[in-house]
Image (cartoon, rainbow, N blue to C red):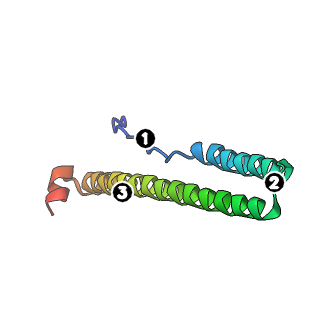
Amino acid sequence: MENTETTTPVTTPKTNALPFVFGLLVGSLVGAATAIILAPQSGAQTRELISAKANEAKVKAGSYAGELKEDLGEWTEKTKKQVVTKFKERLAHTNGNTPETVQAQ
């Protein structure tokens, strides 16, 4: 008997963006720290600038974390639906029913 079942591929979240964003944040912090240390200004101004840059980095990291959480939530919901659909299809196949009959139950 030939298997004519079609499968829908499960997509993964945007995992390739994580290393890029992490590298961007680290590079920005290193560049900012180097510029601050080498800039000719008073200690108080330097501390104030460091504090401002740290707060800016914190906001950016929080924003990225929120986006990542949202993307993972969407991916999780999509995957759950695919798993439930496949399970119902297989259950219907083993019981001799159609997927619509199983879904109605």
Q: Residues within 10 Å of mark 2 (few under 14, many from 20)?
A: few
Give 15 or 59, whichever is nearer the viewer.
59
Whichever of labels 2 and 3 marks the residue nearer the N terminus, that label is 2
Which residue shows up at 52% across the image and 45% down it?
14
Which residue shows up at 22% across the image and 53% down it?
96
Mark 1: amino acid: Pro
Q: Residues within 10 Å of mark 3 (few under 14, many from 20)?
A: few
Mark 3: amino acid: Glu
Which residue shows up at 77% across the image and 65% down it?
44
**In this orientation, does residue 87 appear?**
yes
Whichever of labels 1 and 2 marks the residue nearer the N terminus, that label is 1
Gap in angstroms between the C-alphas marked 2 and 3: 52 Å
Q: Secondary structure at mark 1?
A: loop
Q: Can you tell which of label 1 and label 3 is closer to the viewer?
A: 3
Tell me residue 53's x, y (percent): 66, 57
Whichever of labels 1 and 3 marks the residue nearer the N terminus, that label is 1
Give the vertical position of 41 relative to 11 (above or below).
Answer: below
Picture disc at residue 82: none
The number of discs equals 3
Q: Secondary structure at mark 3?
A: helix
Tell me residue 21's x, y (percent): 62, 46
Q: Can you tell which of label 2 and label 3 is closer to the viewer?
A: 2
Tell me residue 66's x, y (percent): 47, 58
Is 78 positioned to the left or the right of 51 in the image? left
Residue sitting farthest toward the front: 42
Which residue shows up at 16% across the image and 51% down it?
100
Q: Which residue is mark 1?
A: 9
Look at the numbered discs 1 and 2 and tell me whether their residues touch, using CB distance below 8 Å. no
Give the vertical position of 94 relative to 21 (above or below).
Answer: below
Q: Which residue is mark 2?
A: 41
**In this orientation, does residue 98 appear?**
no
Q: Which residue is mark 3?
A: 77
